[in-house]
Image (spheres, helix red, strand yellow):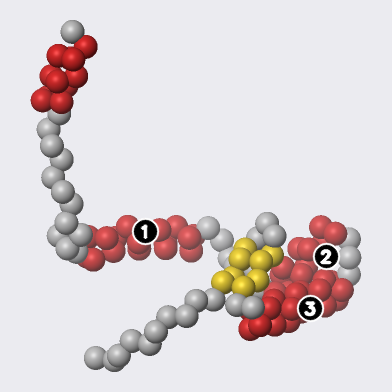
């Protein structure tokens, strides 16, 4: 009885058509991307360096000048690491990894 149930289920399930990536134009995908970008912009204003320093200084009870110094030092160390090794990780925040991509011809 189990075999006939499986066979009938397979027969009742219509075959899904294969999706051709060329059938979907960029124009169909663009509204989704635009909607996502609009929602990101509406989320709030981006913190500047001084705004970030102010927030960290308030949270850690440090002077803003000290926090700015730490941020500058972090930027210089991260820049040096990316140039030297091609990768830098700030644990819990992000990882920057460079890639080599061949140049494309114009036109």
Which quadrant holds residue 32? bottom left
Residue at image position (81%, 74%) is 70
Q: Is residue 2 above or below residue 33?
A: above
Q: Name the residue that disc number 3 marks.
A: 73
Residue at image position (23%, 66%) is 26
Q: Which mark is residue 71?
A: none
Name, please, the residue furthest toward the top: 1
Near mark 2 (Cα within 10 A), the count class, few <14, some 14-19 or many ≥20, is some
Quadrant in which the C terminus is drawn: bottom left
- Real-space CA distance between mark 1 and mark 3, rounded to the nearest whole angstrom: 37 Å
Give the mark nearest the N terminus, 2 or 3: 2
> Percent x, y for residue 99?
50, 76
The local secondary structure at tag 1 comes to helix
> Percent x, y for residue 10?
15, 26
Near mark 3 (Cα within 10 A), the count class, few <14, some 14-19 or many ≥20, is few
Q: Nearer the viewer, residue 64 or 77?
A: 77
Residue 84 appears in view: yes
Q: Which mark is residue 35?
A: 1
Give the mark nearest the N terminus, 1 or 3: 1
Q: Nearer the viewer, residue 81 or 59?
A: 81
The answer to whether marks 2 and 3 mark residues whose Cβ atoms lie closer than 8 Å is no
Horizontal relation, residue 99 to residue 93: left or right: left
Q: Which mark is residue 57?
A: 2
Callout in the foreground (1, 3): 3
Residue at image position (66%, 82%) is 84
- Real-space CA distance between mark 2 and mark 3, rounded to the nearest whole angstrom: 16 Å
């Amino acid at each position: 009885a189990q075999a006939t149930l499986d066979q009938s289920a397979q027969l009742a399930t219509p075959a899904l058509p294969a999706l051709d990536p060329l059938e979907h134009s960029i124009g169909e995908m663009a509204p989704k991307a635009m909607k996502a970008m609009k929602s990101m912009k509406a989320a709030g204003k981006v913190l500047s360096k001084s705004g970030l320093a102010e927030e960290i200084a308030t949270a850690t009870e440090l002077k803003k000048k000290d926090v700015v110094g730490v941020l500058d030092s972090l930027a210089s160390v991260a820049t040096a690491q990316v140039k030297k090794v091609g990768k830098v990780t700030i644990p819990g925040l992000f990882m920057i990894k460079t890639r080599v991509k061949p140049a494309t011809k114009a036109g």
